[in-house]
Image (cartoon, rainbow, N blue to C red):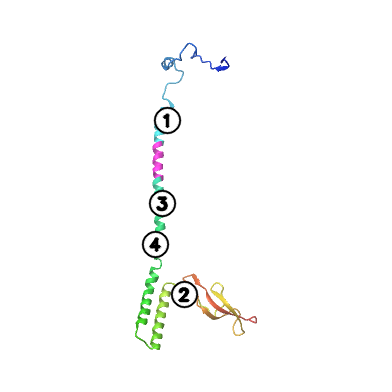
Amino acid sequence: MGKTNGKTEVENPNLDLEHELPASDDAEEEQPSTRAEGPSPQTVASPEVERLKVERDTLLDRLARLQAEFENARKRAAREQQDYREYALVDAVKALLPILDSFDLALEAPGPEASEFRSGIELINKQLHDTLVKLGLRPIPAKGEPFDPHLHEAIEMVDTSEAKDHEVLEELQRGYKLKDRLLRPAMVKVARNPKS
């Protein structure tokens, strides 16, 4: 390297900055090549690169299709779940319709006697209970049973020696289970008998 006017010049044997132009590419081709004859790495890799590009494009296309299928399945499942929520009570309501019809007929009847009216209401009550039992509703036994905090809600403790300690004396409101799930606990009065 040489310095001219404070600037660094790069010495190049093929380039004389003052007098000569750089040698042309044709001149290089005339010089004997020290490299081994054969295809260049770019030529060898080209079919392999093209194959990989095609494979990549195929995989990306498959991925896009699978994502679309997954999104469609997710939307379909959400729609089915919404439909299930909206129409889950259809069977229960259909089962209760005859009872509603019986109430309507009882109320439209012209001035029945009190005993006839009562027997009609008792029949409708039995019809309602039978229908609910078919749907899986079960009353929780309470009166005379030992107090169970999982099934009973104690409203009052009554000191008495006529019943066992923690025995349910009175059912204030009936409790129900739907199959194995507690719908509401029975509201009860419970005996307290420290002598038992």
- Work out how far the residue at label 3 is from the one at label 1, CA to CA, in angstroms: 38 Å
User: On the image, numbered disc 4 is attached to which residue?
Assistant: 83
Q: Per the image, is 58 magenta?
A: yes
User: On the image, numbered disc 1 is attached to which residue?
Assistant: 45
- Work out how far the residue at label 1 is from the one at label 4, CA to CA, in angstroms: 56 Å
The residue drawn where x is 48% and y is 72% is: 177
Tell whether label 4 touches label 2 (CB within 8 Å).
Answer: no
**Span highlighted in magenta in the image:** 53-63
Disc 2, SS: strand
The residue drawn where x is 38% and y is 69% is: 91
User: Mostly what secondary structure, the magenta segment?
Assistant: helix
- From the top left corner, tell me how far across and down residue 96 is, in percent: 39, 74
Considering only order in the chain, which callout, 4 or 2, is on the residue closer to the N terminus? Answer: 4
Tell whether label 4 touches label 1 (CB within 8 Å).
Answer: no
User: On the image, numbered disc 3 is attached to which residue?
Assistant: 71
Disc 1, SS: helix
- From the top left corner, tell me how far across and down residue 47 is, in percent: 39, 32
Label of residue 70 in the image = none
- Work out how far the residue at label 2 is from the one at label 4, CA to CA, in angstroms: 27 Å
Q: Is residue 188 left or right of residue 66?
A: right
Which of pointers 1 and 4 indicates the residue nearer the eye?
Answer: 4
Placement of 42 over or under 4, stated as above or below: below
Residue furthest right as drawn:
195
Q: Amino acid at mark 3?
A: Glu
Placement of 36 over or under 81, stated as above or below: above
